[in-house]
Structure formats: C-alpha cells, structure tokens
C-alpha cells in the first residue's frame, strides 16, 4: 500500500501559503467545548491568513464573538438536512449562521460512518447551507477496503455526483481518505496529487480541494506544496495552538 512516511522529499518546490491563499481548517470534533476551547481560540486570535476553526456547537457563538475582529473565520462541524421542525437534537443551517459562522463541514467520514449519512443527505444539507449564507465544506473519501480494492476513483465519483447541489455559489471540497484519519498514515504525495487532480476534473475545476487525514506540522508543508491541493483540513493537530500555528505557518 502506498502509505507515505513523515519525512518529505526535497524535490518538491515549497509554495508560499500566503501567496497561494491556501485554506487551513481546524476541526475540533467533540473536544474543547468549554473554557478550554475559548482559551484555544484566544491563543489563535492574532493569526493572519486564510484560516477557519470549527469548534463544538456549545461554544460556537462565543468563539465567533471572540474572533469578530480577527482574520480567522468560524465554521460548524455539521448541520441538519431540515430547516426546522420536530427534529430533536439537530441544528439547522440558519441556526449555525445566526451563531456567527461562515462555514459548515458536511459529509465528514465520521458522520457518514457513524450516522449512516448518505451522499443524498449531504447534498440536501449543502443546499440548505448555501440558502442560509454558509459556505459548505463537503468531504469525500474512500475507506481502506475501497482503497485496497482499487475503487478509490469509483467511490469519489459517486460521492461527488450525489453530494454537490446544483449551484453557482461557493463550495469547498475536502478529500479525506478514511484510512488516514487519525491513524498517522498519509498517502504518498503522488497519490494526493492524483486524487485531487481527479476531483478537480470531475467537478470541472470549479471548487477548491483540501486534503484531510493525519495532517501535522511535519507533513503540512509538503502537502500544501502540491499545486492541486488548495489547503488542509486538520483534526487532532488543530487542538494544540502551537502545532496548529506551525501548520498555518508551513
């Protein structure tokens, strides 16, 4: 299998993050939904660049207020496929927007897996997010079983076809190989380049394409140097201010 070690080959030209305007998104997942999260946001408040942080729902409004004069943007980790009604425990796109968010992550592999979310549901959520004035960040990616069976492109094409609504508004795609998330395994740079190129081809090169999956300060620079990669979606490494800042400054 084409797993890529932490060390990076020197033959890759490193492209300036600022010059390319690459997007760095921090997904806190179900972590730091209290004072620890607010402190983390405070530690990031002076950062410059194209950066979005996605805290838990419990502190979204407080973080958005805290960062109101900062260059950082705030996003939610999901939203409902319904606008309102008897849907206990769900949060609508308009509620997310009213909390001060500009972005929302949709179709993350953990949601697709644990909640059995289909691409059709992702498309419905994305349409509601756009209607609410949010920028949807739609995640796609293959499982280890798909990868080993050589079905990566087949899976990506299906997810792209069914997850993206018909629109001329701004959308971001995030490619996250499920087998790389939280495992420390990272595809080779050639593999990342190939999959991102495929996604761009399938979508008519209309959307930025981020890479997500065990991104750290040790591999971020090499990944961000790939022209087809528009930025990174960071999980665990975004929970430590020093590590996240290193990724932003890669």
Image (cartoon, rainbow, N blue to C red):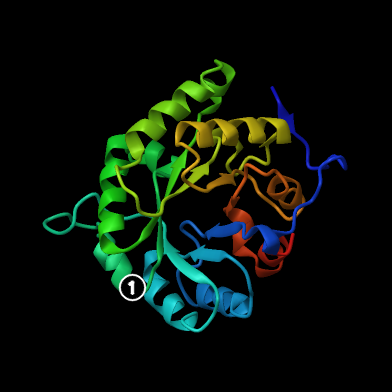
93 left or right of 156? left
Dot 1 falls on a residue whose secondary structure is loop
Q: Which quadrant holds residue 236?
A: bottom right
125 left or right of 219? left
Q: Nearer the viewer, residue 31 or 162?
A: 162
Q: Could you tell me if residue 6 is visible in this image?
A: yes
Image quarter (top left, top right, bottom left or bottom right) of the C terminus: bottom right
Which residue: 43% across, 63% down?
Answer: 75
Residue closest to the far left: 86
Which residue: 66% across, 35% down?
Answer: 193
162 left or right of 142? left
Residue 20 position (above or below residue 229): below
**Percent coordinates x, y for residue 14 in the rendering:** 79, 51
Residue 77 position (above or below residue 1): below
Residue 23 position (above or below residue 11): below
Q: Which quadrant holds residue 214?
A: top right
Q: Which quadrant holds residue 227?
A: top right
Image quarter (top left, top right, bottom left or bottom right) of the N terminus: top right
Which residue: 40% across, 71% down?
Answer: 60
Residue closest to the far right: 10
Q: Nearer the viewer, residue 171 or 24?
A: 171
Residue where numbered disc 1 is placed: 99
Within-10-Å neighbours for mark 1: few <14, some 14–19, many 20+: many
**Percent coordinates x, y for residue 199 in the rendering:** 51, 34
Which residue: 73% across, 64% down?
Answer: 249
**Percent coordinates x, y for residue 237 in the rendering:** 64, 57
**Percent coordinates x, y for residue 122 in the rendering:** 32, 43
């Amino acid at each position: 299998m084409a797993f890529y070690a932490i060390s990076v080959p020197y033959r890759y030209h490193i492209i300036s993050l600022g010059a390319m305007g690459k997007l760095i998104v921090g997904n806190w997942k179900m972590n730091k939904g209290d004072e620890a999260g607010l402190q983390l946001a405070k530690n990031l408040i002076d950062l410059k660049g194209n950066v979005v942080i996605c805290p838990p729902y419990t502190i979204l409004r407080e973080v958005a207020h805290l960062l109101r004069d900062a260059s950082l943007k705030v996003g939610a980790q999901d939203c409902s496929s319904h606008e309102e009604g008897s849907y206990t425990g769900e949060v609508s796109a308009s509620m997310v927007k009213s909390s001060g968010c500009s972005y929302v992550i949709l179709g993350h592999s953990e949601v697709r897996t644990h909640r059995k979310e289909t691409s059709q549901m992702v498309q419905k959520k994305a349409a509601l997010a756009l209607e609410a004035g949010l920028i949807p960040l739609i995640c796609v990616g293959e499982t280890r079983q798909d990868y080993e069976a050589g079905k990566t492109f087949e899976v990506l094409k299906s997810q792209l076809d069914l997850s993206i609504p018909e629109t001329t508004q701004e959308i971001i795609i995030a490619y996250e190989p499920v087998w790389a998330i939280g495992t420390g395994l990272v595809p080779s740079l050639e593999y990342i380049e190939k999959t991102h190129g495929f996604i761009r081809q399938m979508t008519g090169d209309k959307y930025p394409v981020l890479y997500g999956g065990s991104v750290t300060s040790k591999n971020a620079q090499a990944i961000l140097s790939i022209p087809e990669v528009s930025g990174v979606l960071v999980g665990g490494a975004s929970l430590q201010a020093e590590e996240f800042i290193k990724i932003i400054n890669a």
